[in-house]
Amino acid sequence: MPWDAIFLTLKLAAVTTVILIVLGLPLAWWLATTRSRVRPVIEAITTLPLVLPPTVLGFYLLILFSPDAPLGDFWLSLTGNTLTFSFTGLVIASCLYSLPFAVQPMQAAFSVLGRGAMEAARTLGAGRWDAFRTIALPLARRGVLTASVLSFAHTLGEFGVVLMVGGNIPGQTRVIAIEIFTAVETLDYKTAHILSAALLGFSFLVLLFVYVVNGRGVRTYG
């Protein structure tokens, strides 16, 4: 059993999920509450990974992360390591690729709240941050939970983006999806079956969990 690939994938999924929730919360709140004219543009950019082929995103990230590019050169001079073919590069790529799976559930949850509860809290003297922390966030917890689970599960199954950015380096960038691909190439169907069945079962349980949680939410607030 390729435990290195399993542990690396779980680590990547966990780090990516934490980053996406931290960065996605303010973005989702802004998208749900703003009346800015640039909102459709930001929504389109946020949703783009859903329709963009993973290899296209991976290709442009590979160029962006290259030592010849400003970002890649800055990171190389700062750390002495390249963003390409590294765990850090995988994290950045995974965050971009899984961004809509984090933002959209939280945005939908915040949109359902409306402005009434927040305005009532403000009239009682609560600051903007206090109102968000004590009113909006607890009421939107189902959306945050759904975003966390979907982000984690989606990162587990990534293939095209991580292959383009990280390559296939055992113990460093070879995640489960790439391990399955490698097993099939080497005719190791037993390993491919085990890993594929595990991802299939996990993905089904994640979707079942999401639908059950959202179904309870509908019955609660309906």
Image (cartoon, rainbow, N blue to C red):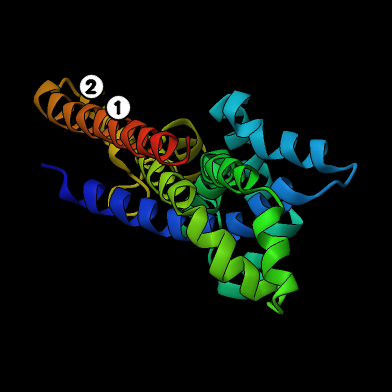
Of 34 and 90, which appears nearest the observer? 34
**Residue 41 image position (x, y, % from top left):** 81, 37
The quarter of the picture where the N terminus appears is top left
**Disc assigned to residue 184:** 2
Q: Which residue is mark 1?
A: 181
Of 141 and 188, which appears nearest the observer? 141
Q: Please, what is the three-letter code of the amino acid marked with disc 1?
A: Phe
**Residue 73 visible to the viewer:** no
Q: Is residue 213 left or right of residue 199?
A: right
Helix, strand or loop at disc 2?
helix
Q: Please, what is the three-letter code of the amino acid marked with disc 2?
A: Val
Quarter of image, res 168: top left
**Residue 6 image position (x, y, % from top left):** 23, 47
Which residue, as the protein is rendered here, is positioned at the far right?
37
Of 68 and 121, which appears nearest the observer? 121
Q: Residue at x 41, y 38 (%)?
A: 154
Quarter of image, res 181: top left
Q: Answer yes or no: do the residues labelled 2 and 1 have beta carbons within 8 Å?
A: yes
**Residue 32 visible to the viewer:** yes
Q: Residues within 10 Å of mark 2 (few under 14, many from 20)?
A: some
Q: Residue at x 71, y 79 (%)?
A: 125
Q: Is residue 140 left or right of residue 57?
A: left
